[in-house]
Amino acid sequence: MFSVYSVVKGCCVNAEIVAIGTELLLGQNLDTNSSWLAQQLALLGIDLFAFQTVGDNEKRIEAALKLACERSQFVITTGGLGPTVDDVTRKVAGRLAQKQLVYNETIAKQIEEVFTKAGKPCPKVNLNQAFIPQGATLIPNAMGTAPGFIVKIGKNQLACLPGVPFEMKAMFENTLRPLLKTLSPSGTVIKSRVFRTTGISESLLNEKILDLFEKSTNPTVAVLAHADGVDIRLTAKAPSDAEANNLLDGLGKTIMTRVPNFIYGLDQDNLETSVGRMLMTRQMTVAVAESCTGGLISHRITQVPGSSAYFLAGWAVYSNRAKSASLGVDPKLIEGKGAVSAQVAEELARNAREKSGANIGISTTGIAGPTGGTPEKPVGLVFVGLSDEQKTQSLEFRFSGNRETIKMKASQAALELLRRHCLKLPLKD
């Protein structure tokens, strides 16, 4: 058995991930393995230089792995280690390593035990998984039947893991992570911090931090746009967690001064969680009346554990009749101003608050499309209402995108108004 440490001793290596599986290319499965592995490599201070995705085709897998092993010092594959004819990763790895596949009796017994414990006979085809390249370092699989392994390809290393996410993660944690730690003997870490914003466009945000983006090399700065907002990601590389955090803290303070009213959270925070904390701290309650979002806001709020402390009621009043029957909106108001109007949004928010006894009422009414728009009221027009005991008001938005995107943007706008209300900020900058 070779030592991974001896191969690249004293240096921090670059890595590459190759995801194998035709289902990934067809879009039938999402490649969550690669994103998870990328995060783990960053925590270990290992630079990830490339991703590849390839289907279950022997020639294309060989070409992908050959390229990866030529340009990257440590390559990790996921997938293609199953027992069936299209699982050819071990065969290709053996050929590139110039090693024969050998039958491992210990692995074969472990595979048979998995089926015995389940009370089933072991199909002969599953024993194909007991073949691994001669001299490879075994990566045991305690969660399934497909073992992984590490082989040397030229001067570099290839680690092959199964594609089943929970099996892959366990094998990485138990075997591969300890080996990879030796690749960064100085303790180098790569850490990121994400500042989550909403209510500001990508272009305007870019203007406000352009000088930081151009000047900063450690941490680096990136702007990432999503349907629900724009993220600012800082990434620092340092010998230790503490030093990386100091770098992130320093630049992070500057970021906060540039766009203070638009940042609602960090890293994995979402807006509903941030708003929930504010409502809980302030002992405030909310009720929701939704037309175009069809219950999405209520769903997002109640996804947060403990939301029963501040969420009192929600109405999905999609039809004009429901708006009047359930929340008392005057039919004449709907007829005169239209269901998609500032006045109806305000009436929905006010009546939801009063009917539920909540401190705050919020509402949405709009045209999510793809049909129903007019020149005066196009698809994407949304009014969001907010009402408290002192004032009832609304804002108009013009969103772009498909139906699902418009609904998400509308729900985000409503939650953002609620956040700003809690912080006593202007509803719109």
Image: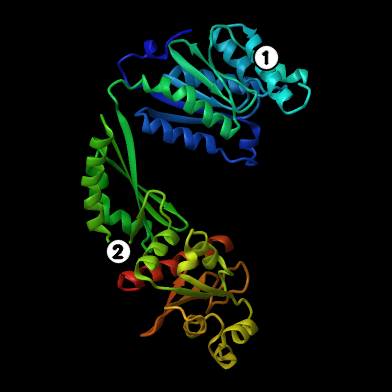
Q: Residue drawn 72% across and 20% down?
A: 126
- Is residue 399 visible from the viewing direction of this image? no
Give the image location of residue 325, x and y in percent.
63, 86
Give amino acid for label 1. Answer: Ala
Q: CA distance from mark 1 to mark 2?
A: 60 Å
Above or below residue 12? Residue 42 is below
Above or below residue 152? Residue 269 is below
Above or below residue 373? Residue 346 is below
Return the residue nearer the eye: 269 or 254: 269
Q: Residue drawn 57% across and 68% down?
A: 295
Give amino acid for label 2. Answer: Asn
Q: Is residue 166 left or right of residue 3?
A: right
Q: Which residue is mark 2?
A: 261
Q: Is residue 170 left or right of residue 261?
A: right
Q: Could you tell me which secondary element the residue under label 2 belongs to? A: loop
Q: Could you tell me which secondary element the residue under label 1 belongs to? A: helix
Give the image location of residue 58, x and y in percent.
64, 20
Return the residue nearer the eye: 408 or 215: 408
Quadrant in the picture for residue 273:
bottom left
- Is residue 208 visible from the viewing direction of this image? yes
- Specify the farthest residue to the bottom: 332
Q: Residues within 10 Å of mark 1 (few under 14, many from 20)?
A: some
Quarter of the image for the C terminus: give it.
bottom left
Q: Is residue 287 left or right of residue 93?
A: left
Return the residue nearer the eye: 265 or 142: 142
Marking on residue 108 = 1
Quadrant in the picture for residue 293:
bottom right
Q: Are marks 1 and 2 in contact (CB under 8 Å)?
A: no
